[in-house]
Image: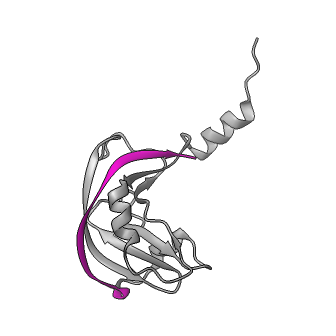
Amino acid sequence: MEEVDVSMSWKKILKGKSGIAYSAIVLDEASREKLLALDIPDGWTPYAHHMTIRMGSLKEDSQYTIGEEIKLNMTGVGRDEKAMAVTVDGVREDGKFFPHITVAVSPDGKPFNSNKIPPENFEDFSGTLTGIVTEVPQ
């Protein structure tokens, strides 16, 4: 009989993980280039990769479908001392944070810091981005 790595199976069950880190709308290259053309401060690390839909896999009743192309309208651009982001009209299904895309982070920042940019730091900004609904593996 073949041995099974039970410890790893139990870890997945206990954590409720499906091997998916997060579900997102991953930007196409043209959209990524639009964001990277913004006035990013010198020394900051660019990201401009995705809008998180939720952590983990999409739920069965998600309004999104894996592989679906989505157009996102940008509604604002803002930053603080650690991160820069654009707000978009997508839907964040976990309800934890506002729908946005991290554009860049400062040398002492992390992409997560874009969730904490104060609303008053954003100014109106418009444009359209395109991406594909994707489940990103761990």
Viewer-proximal residue among 73 and 19: 73
Where is residue 96 drawn, in percent x and y?
42, 65
Quarter-wise, where is residue 123 in the image? bottom left
Can residue 99 be seen here? The reply is no
Can residue 127 be seen here? The reply is yes
Where is residue 20 drawn, in percent x and y?
52, 44
Identify which residue is drawn at 40% across, 45% down.
Answer: 134
Q: In the figure, is residue 92 to the left or right of 81? A: left
Does residue 83 lie above or below 121 as drawn?
A: above
Is 28 magenta? The answer is no
Q: Quadrant of the N terminus?
A: top right
Does residue 101 lie above or below 118 as drawn?
A: above
Quarter-wise, where is residue 19 in the image? top right
Q: What kind of colouring is applied to the model shown?
A: one colour
Q: In the figure, is residue 25 to the left or right of 22? A: left
Viewer-proximal residue among 125 and 37: 37
Residue span colored magenta = 120-138
Identify which residue is drawn at 73% across, 24% down.
Answer: 4
Identify which residue is drawn at 35% across, 41% down.
Answer: 66
Where is residue 56 drawn, in percent x and y?
49, 48
Dominant secondary structure, magenta: strand
Identify which residue is drawn at 37% across, 81% down.
Answer: 78
Extreme residue toward the top, this view: 1
Q: In the figure, is residue 47 to the left or right of 10? A: left
